[in-house]
Image (cartoon, rainbow, N blue to C red):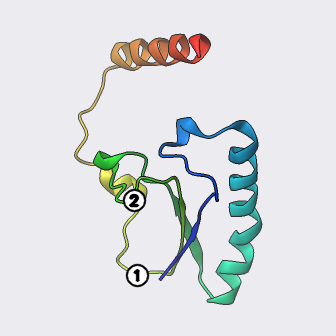
Amino acid sequence: GHILVVPKIHFERVEDLSPEISNALFSTVQRLTGPVRRSVNAHALTIGINDGREAGQVVPHVHIHIIPRDRNDGGGTIHSIMSRRPRLSEDDMARIAEKILKEDSSS
């Protein structure tokens, strides 16, 4: 099993979070990681957010999964979802980075 950290106020996407709610949400996740890991004797944790339907978000409300992990549990890594992605050239990555920076400065 795993636990969910869920803000009480509704936000569908991470980008919709206010800075105050975002800080409180991630502070709560950080505070709980040690207690969750130790309480179930896990070796590690996977912490994840499915942000949007195509990413696997079923419930349209921001929530963070804290998933206890052990060696050979078969759960895979976050990198396992990246194996099907196309490889980008350095130029493509630079263009994308430029677009992200432009979008970020306009928000």
Residue 82 shows in the view: no
Q: Give the residue at x 68% y 62%.
A: 29
Residue bearing mark 2: 59
Q: Is residue 4 left or right of residue 33?
A: left
Which residue is farthest bottom? 40
Q: Give the residue at x 69% y 54%.
A: 25
Instruction: Locate residue 101, reporting x and y percent.
Output: 55, 15
Q: Give the residue at x 39% y 20%.
A: 93
Instruction: Locate residue 42, reporting x and y percent.
Output: 59, 83
Callout 2 amino acid: Val
Query: What is the secondary structure assignment of the residue under circle 2?
Result: loop
Residue 6's disc is none
Which residue is farthest front? 9
Callout 1 amino acid: Asp
Q: Earlier in the sequence, mark 2 or mark 1?
A: 2
Assess disc 2: are there few (<14), some (14-19) or many (≥20) residues with their C-alpha within 10 Å of its C-alpha.
few
The quadrant in which residue 39 appears is bottom right
Assess disc 1: are there few (<14), some (14-19) or many (≥20) residues with their C-alpha within 10 Å of its C-alpha.
few
Query: What is the secondary structure assignment of the residue under circle 1?
Result: loop
Quadrant showing the C terminus: top right
Above-or-below relation of 9 to 101: below
Q: Give the residue at x 63% y 53%.
A: 9
Nearest the eye: 20 or 38: 20
The quadrant in which residue 15 appears is top right
Residue 102 shows in the view: yes
Q: Nearer the viewer, mark 2 or mark 1?
A: 2
Nearest the eye: 46 or 107: 107
Instruction: Locate residue 95, reporting x and y percent.
Output: 40, 12
Residue bearing mark 1: 73
Instruction: Locate residue 64, reporting x and y percent.
Output: 55, 60
